Amino acid sequence: VIFGSSQEGSIIVAHEIAELIKEKAASNKPCVLGLATGSSPVKVYEELVRMHNEEGLSFANVVTFNLDEYYPMDKDNIQSYFYFMHEHLFNHVDILPENINIPNGTVKSEDLHQYCIAYENKIKDLGGLDFQLLGIGRTGHIGFNEPGSHFNSATRNITLDYITRVDAASSFLGIDNVPRKAITMGVGTVRSAKRIVLLGWGINKAEVLRETIEGEITSQVPATYLQEHHNTTFVLDEGASSEL
Ligand code: GLP
């Protein structure tokens, strides 16, 4: 779906999420959301916060799982996704702290494998993700599933692609400060969501979105795996869709 601006597209997506939250609340069920960081979802979170403040949208029944976190990474580091999510969403709504799940960048390396299995199991125990919000990286990554990621990959510790680190360099004040690793939900974790919305804004994403939507399905562009998901929508603006 192509919108005139990222603002318009973001509002529509936020409203879909809000409807789902209300629907689940009406039947006393948790609403399990998979959330993304980066600039792409910022306006969606802004609109959700506005709906919380002005329309009484409650997050009391919402359980969230974030896609990824740099590794290693302290929670109070302003570059952490933990910080980002609190800044843009969690500090402004009534979500219960115990319902917030973000991969923990401080887990000891010897405990990481078990930690990732537990993260994955926690999602499964809740019946899976009802909705997964995604952005896309220039390498075609979703979460931090870089080229080479397997279709069925689960939550794990990965090595970041050089291009991804270049793209993150400005917020870390230089590439040398960008972590080399991250924890990410897998492609399989993302694909198991009942509904997926990928946001793409701006001309910088046009080329990778063309490959993602019109190219062959390949592990070299992990976002192409979404072509096989039965309920995924790509929400784009004019710039991002200019190569389609
Ligand atoms: C990071 C995140 C991804 C995100 C991507 C794009 O790599 N791990 O989840 O989709 O950045 O970021 P942006 O939305 O800022 O373009």
Image: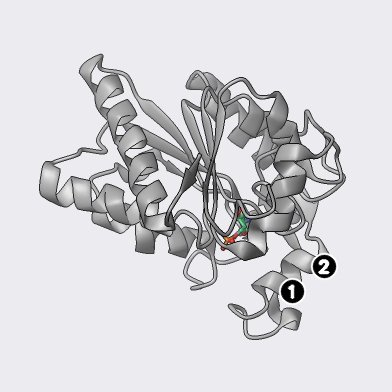
Q: At which x and y percent is residue 182?
A: 70, 56
- The extreme top residue here reads 27
> Could you say whether the residue bearing mark 1 is in a helix, strand or loop?
helix
Rendering quadrant holding ligand 1 = bottom right
**Could you say which is closer to the camera, residue 240 or residue 134?**
240
> Could you say whether the residue bearing mark 2 is in a helix, strand or loop?
helix
**Residue 113 visible (yes or no):** no
**Residue 155 visible (yes or no):** yes
Q: Assess whether mark 1 and mark 2 are in contact (beta carbons under 8 angstroms).
A: yes
Asked if residue 104 is positioned above or below residue 21 in the image, the reply reads below
Residue type marked 2: Tyr
Residue labelled with disc 2: 162
* Residue at 67% across, 56% down: 206
Q: CA distance from mark 2 to mark 1?
A: 6 Å
Residue type marked 1: Val
Q: At which x and y percent is residue 181?
A: 75, 60
* Residue at 36% across, 60% down: 88
Dot 1 crowding, Cα within 10 Å, few <14, some 14–19, many 20+: some
Disc 1 under 8 Å from ligand 1? The reply is no
**Could you say which is closer to the camera, residue 117 or residue 43?**
43
Q: At which x and y percent is residue 14?
A: 34, 42
* Residue at 25% across, 35% down: 60
Q: At which x and y percent is residue 69?
A: 60, 56
**Could you say which is closer to the camera, residue 215 or residue 47?**
215
Residue labelled with disc 1: 166
* Residue at 73% across, 43% down: 212
